[in-house]
Image (spheres, grey):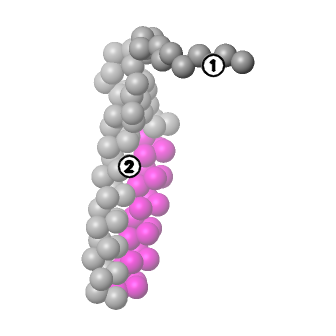
Amino acid sequence: MSQNTEIDPVYTEEIGHGNSIAAWACVGIMTIGFIIGGIAFAFHNATVVYASIGVVVLGLIVGWIMKKAGFGVGGSRSGAAH
C-alpha cells in the first residue's frame, strides 16, 4: 500500500478566508455583542446578557443577508475582480 504524501504547492484559485464586507460586518456586530455580554455577565446583569445574545444572532443574520445581496466573497458587489 502506497501513500502519496506530497503536497501540491500550486493553487488554482485565491483562498478568500471570508475577507469580505459581509464577513467583516458579521464579525464586527458579533464582537460587539460578545464584549457587551461579557461585561454584563461580570456585573450579573442577565437582561443585558440575553440582549447581547440577540446582538450576536443579529450579526449572523446581517452577514447572511449581506452575502445574499452580493457583498460576500466573490459577490457581485464585493469589489473583488473575479
User: Which amino acid, mark 1?
Assistant: Gln
Observer able to see residue 81: yes
Residue at 34% x, 65% y: name it: 33
Residue at 43% x, 69% y: name it: 53
Residue at 40% x, 24% y: name it: 15
Rendered view: 5 above or below 47: above
Determine whether, in the image, residue 6 is placed left or right of residue 48.
right
Circle 2 SS class: helix
Q: Where does the image place residue 38, in percent across and percent down from the top left? A: 32, 74
Q: Where does the image place residue 74, in percent across and percent down from the top left? A: 42, 24
Q: Disc 2 marks which residue?
A: 26
User: Which amino acid, mark 2?
Assistant: Cys
State the residue in front, 13 or 61.
13
Quarter assignment of residue 51: bottom left
Q: Disc 1 marks which residue?
A: 3
Mark 1 residue crowding within 10 angstroms, few (<14) / some (14–19) / many (20+): few
Q: Main secondary structure of the magenta part?
A: helix
Rendered view: 55 above or below 43: above
Determine whether, in the image, residue 25 is placed left or right of residue 2.
left
Quarter assignment of residue 43: bottom left
State the residue in front, 2 or 73.
2
Circle 1 SS class: loop
Mark nearer the N terminus (2 vs 1)? 1
Alpha carbons under labels 2 and 1: distance apart? 41 Å
Question: Disc count in the image?
Answer: 2
| Quadrant of image for the N terminus | top right
State the residue in front, 25 or 5.
5
* Span of residues in magenta: 45-66
Confirm whether the magenta stretch covers residue 52.
yes
Residue at 41% x, 14% y: name it: 9
Rendered view: 6 above or below 15: above
Dot 2 and dot 1 residues touching (CB under 8 Å) = no
